[in-house]
Image (cartoon, grey):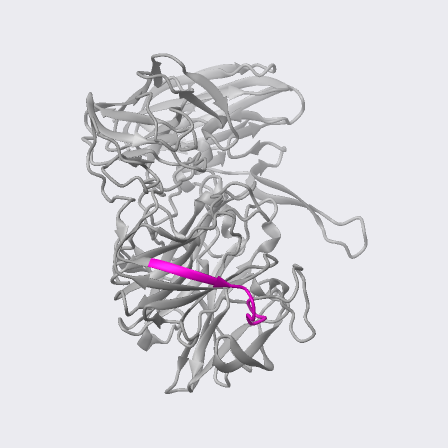
Amino acid sequence: MVPIAARTRAFAFSCMLLLCMTPPARSQTVALPFTCSHSVRTDHLPEFVAPPAPNLYNTSPTLKVGWGIDSPTGFVRIGGEVWVFFNSGNQYGTTVKVARYRGRDFEHTERQADGVITVEAGVSTHFCGGLWYDSTAGKLYAPIHCEYAREIQPPAGWSRKKTRLATSTDRGQTWNLEGDILTDFLPGNEDWLKFSGSYFEAGPADFDFYADERGGYFYIFTCNAYAPKSGAMNNFLWFNEAARCAIGDRMAPGRWLKFYRGGWTEPGLGGKASRVTMGSYSMYGRVIFSRFLKTYMRIGVVLGAVDRRYTTLGFGDGSVYCSTCDDLATQQWTPMGKIVDDPSNAKFGFTLTDERGVDPSSCDRTLRLYNYWLYDIPSRAIDITFGPGTTTATGFPRYGSYAFEPLPESGDTVVSRQTKIVGCEDNETVYGGSGWTRREGAAYFQGAAKESGAKGAFVQMSFTGPSVYWRGVADSAGGIADVYLDGKCVETVDTYFHDELPDQFAFVRTGLDPRVAHVVKIVVRGEKNPRSAGTIIRHTAFEYGAESYRASAGFSSVMGKNNWYYGNAQGRDVRFIDFIRTPSPVPGGRENKTFTNEWRDTSGGRVGNDYQACVSRPVSRTWLAPHSGIVRVEGSVMADSTGGSTRILLNNRVTWSGRVDPRGVPAAHDLTLDVAPGDAVQFTLNEKTGNGSAAVRWDPIITFLK
């Protein structure tokens, strides 16, 4: 969703006369500094981007392609010749073959003897096409996309990822593994459950490498994601990050720095990074410098385009987009403009060259784009010619997609925001006017949204805090709403978009006075974008800036992380269990694993992200106050097949007690407590009746009021 501003009808968010608005921080509909035309061909392409038959595991007489184009193919110039390197065979083996081609240009090469690289077991080796040749030392450098801890998928939505470095001094016949150069914040194999809440950082890989010899740095643009610890991947939660290394440092491990809040300050190994966007979303593609336009161009598909091998949640438009940047040091990319309109495209692999097919780093007026992917035949070569003028950037919503819980391990200010989320059915939400109905959806916060298209209908929330975020769903029937803050109309928002975006921010306002009460109000205008099928405003949640601790959002395998302890205030007599493992009934077979992700005591009591279960003695979840203040303690206790008693204690003093109704009727609590540093608020399930160790749902929220 974007604020309405005067713009041409070619924009995805059409223009209209505003009755209230404020200028956006950065428009999603600026114009790119070029026009372009293109031509496409599919014949006479090299086999390393065009497998000879539409078969996922196709094998030609001389080259195993198949998964070999699961990652982009790249090339490098050595001594006036073009050399192409990519995987030939099993990327998941310990001895990985590397196909080698040499010739006068990218399309006219001859096969050379395969090279080889030896790696440890359990870590994949994907040559992603990032190559640089040091002519003075006669040495090749190749960052490598790696997948590891793949046994966690399922239940996890993805495997772990990182980027490594390989080098060769014999033109790719033998490769030496130099080590990791980019990892996530917690990169150990067993660290994925140490991340807070429901997600873990998949890791910086699936990258685009660019050697910017003009500026003196190597750049890697990675595709990272927050993947669910259990469940299908949400493609909207993919994003770009950037890292760089001085060319003089020769890509060495430990010499890379991540882009973090406007500067290059965080280490590539274990550091945090901010999102790098081309507007509100990012891109899976390649970078090239246009001498004709005097700018860097990033060309590819929108990151988050749905890959139906894994999920249906993502962008349905696989068209080819472009964004530009004048200085890679700043990472100030323009919003994306569509240069090849092809919504059904599922070819996610890109190789860019100049029009002669010999230079991967720069072009003049024309560039060539090779577009391919796995079994999506035919592959194609697209010649794109640029001219003077402007191209309208596509009107993606102003804000990107974010998980429904803050992710404190992220270096991005919005991803790691500290807020309290208020669902559409929470008591703090007030509705007025007509037409409000409930809509269920697995992708919505707490599985529900409220919607109305009636003029004058409104939803509002009162809060005290420095920021407010509105989660209003964008979709093909989205309408237009006015946003009021403290009684003043501050923005008009158009919620039309051709794809449904269930975890999108529609409005964000920061820098508010945190000491006074505020009111945010969304008013349905009963109007719509000409492209929209309706005037519907769909509300899923508000968030506001607060020091708030939701049990499920802070849950992890680390005792005491985010101030939460399990079992009792001291965390004694409990241990964390990731999987229950049992031997295979078949000799030599794989062990059977059941995902648990919970803390257990010796009696069989359990504490999970939003539940507790006891067998023969009480089981507790405890929060320790980091400082003094007044806190609000909210939540409800609910079970479907068991009963029992619950208590909330402050330093062993009972402040609330309730009975668990076995018929699924919740027992709610909402109280305020004075706490001092180190005070323990303990949520205890004392006894149970009914179905053995069945879980009781209890996801308390503790919020500092002052």
Tell which of 227 and 524 is nearer to you.
Answer: 524
Q: Quadrant of the N terminus?
A: top left
Which quadrant, please, contains the C terminus?
top left
In the rendered view, would you say 428 is above or below 506?
above
- List x then y, in percent, for residue 610: 51, 31
Does the magenta-highlighted stretch encompass residue 34? no
**Residue 342 visible (yes or no):** yes
**Location of residue 344 in the rendering, given as x and y in whole percent from the top left corner:** 52, 48
Q: What range of the chain is rendered magenta? A: 36-49
93 or 271: nearer the viewer: 93
Q: Quadrant of residue 462?
A: top left
Give whichever of 489, 666 is nearer the camera.
Answer: 489
| Residue depicted at x 62% and y 44% | 579
Rendered view: 77 above or below 326: below
Residue 47 is one of the magenta-drawn residues = yes
| Residue 395 vertical position relative to residue 125 in the rendered view, above or below | above
Note whether residue 679 is visible: no
Which residue: 32% across, 27% down? 480
